[in-house]
Amino acid sequence: MPAAEIITIGTEILLGEIVDTNTRHIARTLRELGIDLYRTITIGDNVERIAGAIRESMQRADIVLTTGGLGPTVDDPTREAVALAAGVELEFRNELWQQVKSVIARYGRKPTENQKRQAFIPRGSFIIPNPVGTAPAFIVETDRNAIISLPGVPREMELLLHESVIPYLETRYSSKQVIKVRVLHTAGQGEGAIDDRIGDLEKLSNPTVGLAAHNGVVDIRLTAKAANETVAGQMLAALEADIRTRLGETIFGVDEDTLENTTLAAVTARGWTLTIAGFGLTDSIQRGLPQITLLANLQSGMLDQALKLLKMERETSAALGVGAFVDDMAIEIAVHTPKHEQSKRFTYGGHPRNLARWAMNVGLNMLRLEAQATE
């Protein structure tokens, strides 16, 4: 199975001025092609450092993808760095210069002299046509490696990746394997507790199992490599069945499922009408649950009573109350359903900024379990 590494180029990324979304998109594309991704790295606009990173990647991986640094300015160093890493000179390619002039002409302008830099690429490179921008894209081949340089503008990069790079990779590195990933979402148990119950599965080599914690939600990532999607799917299904047997109702969803949507769907399936109230919650939580009512000046210990009054006022059959008390580093949850009522208080040991999200996830999960429980 071929292996790849991704190098994103740009000092603006290192300074935190922009967020690198290209790496995630390329990584998911490589996964679908059955190509292993060994590592990713971000380098500032420095020719020597970029060239050094490319050389190191060439030693470990078959495919090296770079994004960014292909513009016309002095601080766009990728062309020179790739040439240096590959041990070749830059050469002027008239067809690239015509491409640059054609794109600029669409704006009713003429190219400046510095934009001619974009027509210089490493000697012997294959040109990747860029119909939506002036940045050149190209591939440098060695006996083992393919160095593929793409623009940093996400829309340009994505277009060239899917129209030109994927067909190239499928031709040169026709992999006999595919990689499939499934993510199981759990709530109600911490990462340590989950690990204690499925730790032996995390030692598997294929399929593999990994954990990631997110403020009251723990994701279990399952990855399978196989000759085709059918076999990979069967491997994932068998592994998922084993995990579900061990974790049961702790698992609330798969892949794109969210705790909010799963819980609300379970409440709807019960035929319950719902009131949600909260205190100390963040704007993002309020946007995610627009039907929430914010409680003002709520004191610790008063959430349950406030929720009862609000539920009576709204005349709903179920209600969820979530209170996040940063001063106490504690949360209070109240869940009222036609089955029964419960109110709980939990202390919290994490970062204060994560308290509200943890509180909401704990509350949603308690309501979910109530709605999904059999009579």
Image (spheres, rainbow, N blue to C red):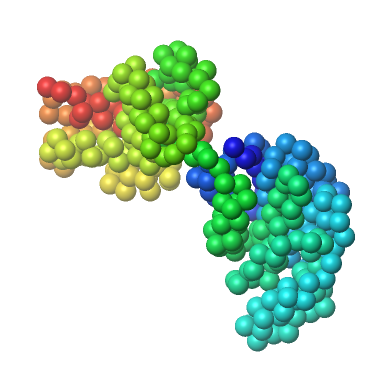
Q: Is residue 67 above or below residue 207?
A: below
Quarter of the figure that contains the N terminus = top right
Name the residue located 14 percent from the left edge and 35 percent from the top edge: 270
* Percent coordinates x, y for residue 251 in the rendering: 33, 27
The x and y percentages for residue 16 are 67, 48
Q: Please tell me how many numbered marks the rendered image carries.
A: 0
User: Is 228 displayed left or right of 104 in the figure?
Assistant: left
Q: In this view of the protein, which residue sits in the foreground, 270 or 60?
A: 60
Give the side of residue 127 with respect to residue 301, left or right.
right
**Looking at the image, which is closer to me, 217 or 120?**
120
Q: Who is closer to the viewer here, 326 or 198?
A: 198
Measured along the vertical axis of the image, is residue 166 above or below residue 328?
below
Tell me the quarter of the picture where residue 126 sits: bottom right
Q: Nearer the viewer, residue 17 or 104?
A: 104
Is residue 8 something one can see in this rendering?
no
Compared with 166, 177 (above or below) is: above
Q: Residue at x 31, y 18 (%)?
A: 245
In the picture, the quarter occupied by the C terminus is top left
Res 255 → quadrant: top left
Q: Position of residue 316 (x, y in %)?
A: 14, 39
Q: Is residue 178 visible?
A: yes
Is residue 361 left or right of 102 when viewed as pictured? left
Residue at 55%, 62% in the rendered image: 163
Side of 52 relative to 207 (left or right):
right
Q: Position of residue 62 (x, y in %)?
A: 69, 42
Residue at the spot x=53%, y=40% of the render?
A: 176
